Amino acid sequence: MDSAERRSEIATEFTITLENRPGQLATLSKSLGEADVNIRALSGMICEGKGILKLLTNDETATRARLQDLGLLFKEQEILTVTVPDRPGKLGDFANMLGEADINIETIFVIDNAAGFMELAIGVDKIEEAKTLPLGQF
């Protein structure tokens, strides 16, 4: 991947609240699969006794509809997806650029890691300002 192929895009991150009991992730992921929704990335944790799942999918409209059908509590947030070289210090350079622009990173996780590059999903507090930065330069 050369610099012309590196990219920065906007995606929708779904933050879903689940009961903290066995089978919740299975039910959700099976239901999304039945709607032909592919999960591109996810992270999860327990917070104050509830399961909190953050995910990106290939179909935001179908994801939203399925979550509503399941009666799940969720919120949506625009996030950045960026591709950076998978080399020491590059994430620091990227984070520094955001910090110098007074943009706080609120969530971050890896979507893909291949051929010497990492694709990251990054939620920030000032998405409109972040969109103006040269995010694909790394």
Image (cartoon, rainbow, N blue to C red):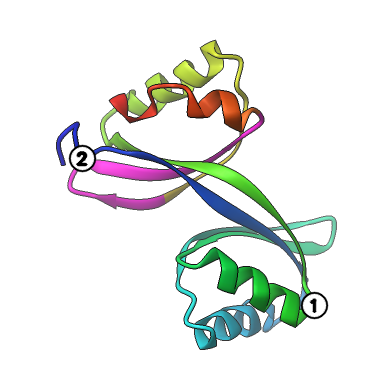
Q: Between 8 and 22, which is closer to the camera in this rendering?
A: 8
Placement of 128 over or under 38, stated as above or below: above
Tell me which residue sits at (41%, 24%) in the image. 94
Q: Pick out the residue farthest to the right.
A: 48
Placement of 12 over or under 132, stated as above or below: below
Query: Mark 2: which amino acid?
Result: Glu
Q: Which mark is residue 111?
A: none
**Residue 23 x/y as whole percent:** 67, 84
Q: Which mark is residue 5?
A: 2
From which residue to which does the magenta span run?
111-125
Task: Give the mark, 2 or 1, whose residue is nearer the N terminus.
Answer: 2
Q: Pick out the residue farthest to the bottom.
A: 34
Q: What secondary structure is found at the residue carrying circle 1?
A: loop
Whether residue 123 appears in magenta in the rendering, the answer is: yes
- Image quadrant occupied by the N terminus: top left
Give the CA distance from mark 2 to mark 1: 39 Å
Whether residue 24 appears in magenta in the rendering, the answer is: no
**Residue 57 x/y as whole percent:** 50, 64
Tell me which residue sits at (20%, 42%) in the image. 116
Q: Between 50 and 125, which is closer to the camera in this rendering?
A: 125
Q: Quadrant of residue 137?
A: top left
Tell me which residue sits at (25%, 41%) in the image. 117
Query: Mark 1: which amino acid?
Result: Gly
Horizontal side of 91 relative to 128 (left or right) equals left
Residue 115 shows up from this direction: yes
| Label 2: few (<14), some (14–19) or many (≥20) C-alpha neighbours in 10 Å | few
| Label 1: few (<14), some (14–19) or many (≥20) C-alpha neighbours in 10 Å | few
Q: Which mark is residue 71?
A: 1
